[in-house]
Amino acid sequence: MNLITLENISKSYSEKKLLEDISLGINDKEKIGLIGVNGTGKSTLLKIIAGAEIPDDGTITKANKVRIEYLPQNPYYDENATVLEQVFKGTCEEMKIIGDYQDVLDKINKSYDEKLNDRLLKLQEKMDALNLWDLESSAKTVLTKLGIKDFNQKVKELSGGQRKRVSLASALITPCELLILDEPTNHLDNDTIDWLETYLNSFKGSILMITHDRYFLDRVTNRILELDKGILYSYEGNYSVFLEKKMNRLQLAESMEAKRQNLLRKELAWVRRGAKARTTKQKARLQRFDELSNKNDYTPEDKLEISVGSSRLGKKIIEIENLSKSFDGRTFIDNLDYTLARTDRIGIVGRNGLGKSTLIRLLNGELKPDSGTISIGETVKIGCFNQDTSKMHPEMRAIDYIKEESDYITTADGHKITASQMCEKFLFNGTLQYTHIKNLSGGEKRRLQLLRVLMMAPNVLLLDEPTNDLDIDTLSRLEDYLDDFNGVLICVSHDRYFLDRVCNKIFAYEGRGKINIYTGNYSDYLDYREQENIEFEEFEDKVKEEKPKAPKKEKPKAKNKPKFSYNEQREFDTIDEDIEKLEDKIASLEEDTSKYATDFTKLQEIMDEKTKLENELQVKYERWEYLNNLAEEIANWSNN
């Protein structure tokens, strides 16, 4: 079944044409990854399909009753809403009913009113009729899996990453036939990305998403769309299949261009011998020569080139002794000792909220340690590529931003390359070089940021989430550059492919400031963790990891009486029964695995259902623990 069709879609901004005559059909159960160089219009295409942008030309035909849910890169937030209220701010009927129910319930909890109570009862009837209690439960399950456990916390109190996860939860639980996601893995840790893969693989509708995460694309998608110079190419299969098919397409295009050039040379030689169009045959041959001369559909790929030198690195690099750092009473680094070696390529991993960026910020001098020392060698030149774009003046031109760092760079073989030439290598052509930063796409800004860091010729590179907003081609070139980089690398990243490709050591944040060091790349670390059955400690990341602040001095407040909300009371009353039902279903499925041992299709269905139920059961266990702890607090308060 076709869900939506785009025909001859075009879109321009000022003089920049992003999309031209794009045609596309999306069918039921397709899981599509949209890729392409930054600035080619990927996000614009998603907005047009979602109805958030209007195309300049072309038509869009949507099947009857097809619902589309869209997660943009920068969602809207109601600062004064609670987490749960924000999740239910969707536009579909189900989300509006639950949102209204939550709103009325909050008002009644603050001040009882008979009219409000009548309204609540009517909304409860609608919830019962549409079976929306499961949707509310799903919202809490998804939020918990995404690391958001305080459903009543105000949105304004959340960090940027937490807000994005709340919006992701809202998109995931909203009933729809087509789910559109723009960079869904940003701000997620690696364990959560694994969970999201499983969730999307079990999603019954269609998915269209932009992501730079190549493992994620490989494991979730069954079709790849590539936007290249305004042309949309479609490939059936996942990312690995796409790479193979694209290589074949490019080889075929190169072969056809070589044949055209060869034939053109022969015809040119014939024309130069003085051929005259006396006969019909000769006229046709001259006409063919004109066609060959004018026809050139082949355009070689623009390739990002990263080949710059680095400063000489002495014997002493960086020595860390007894390093500790805390914020608001929480320890992020506790007594870390490490001496950096010339060959170190370190990846920093761990769950959100554990302070993974803290070490980067300490090494960069942005933070001061509470105790311990960081001793940096005299020849060390640190380059830091982070997520902060605030220092990029919006009115500055791209070329001036680069020249502000350096007018030229010396390559590894001693050649000097000007700032403008380096911009060309980073896919900033003449026009784009003189574009104001405010008019660049998010990905183009990140690419410009990266170029400026490399223009420093650093010998110690600190990368804080370098893969965010970079396209796959840029990431591949950066990985190639890091292969030849004659210096030390330390990076925080949630991109598993990137960590596998460039790292030879893993610093794993495992809770309460404990950092364990493992030799090997990310996959090696996962294997070791599985063998040793290592579990991270859970933390609610209420402290903003990006900009931790010193605790404010406040007057002591009287502790409020603990109590169940209406929904929590309902959940508490039924959770034991819910857990028992799930355990029974899982036990039944385990019996079925023996019964259908030779029916592999049926067996796979059973295993998928069993995995889904086990995930639900794990969340129920966590909710059971939370609710029983709250019940105990209520009982203790009453006894006192």
Image (cartoon, rainbow, N blue to C red):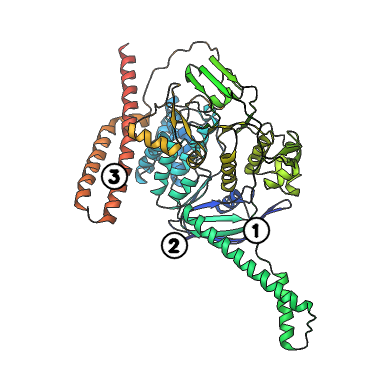
Among the two numbered marks 2 and 3 on one chain, the one whose residue lies closer to the N terminus: 2
Residue 482 location in percent, x, y?
Answer: 58, 39
Q: Nearer the viewer, mark 2 or mark 1?
A: 1
The kind of secondary structure element at disc 2 is loop
Label disc, if present, on residue 429 of the rendered structure = none
Q: Which residue is mark 3?
A: 610
Q: How packed is label 1: few (under 14 Cα within 10 Å), some, or many (20 or more)? A: few
Task: From the viewer's perspective, tell me whether residue 429 is left or right of residue 146.
Answer: right
* Depth order, front residue of 34/375: 375
Amino acid type of the residue that numbered disc 2 sits on in the rendered structure: Met
- The CA distance from mark 2 to mark 1 is 36 Å
Give percent across and percent down for residue 356. 50, 28
Q: Is residue 415 above or below residue 262?
A: above
Residue type at numbered disc 1: Pro
Work out whether mark 2 precedes mark 1 in sequence or the reverse, and give the earlier one: 2
Q: In which quadrant is the N terminus drawn?
A: bottom left
Q: Position of residue 613 (x, y in %)?
A: 30, 42
Judging from the image, what secondary structure is the residue with disc 3 in?
helix
Instruction: Say which element carries label 1.
Output: loop
Task: Please indicate, yes or no, whether residue 22 appears anywhere in the rendered image.
Answer: yes
- Observer-side mark, 1 or 3, equals 1
Q: Nearer the viewer, residue 398 or 409?
A: 409
Question: Which residue is disc 2 drawn over?
Answer: 1
Residue 171 horizontal side relative to residue 284, left or right: left
- Residue assigned mark 1: 300
Residue 443 x %, y %: 62, 43
Tell me the residue at 38%/40% (across/down). 138
* Residue 475 higher or lower than 163, as above or below: below
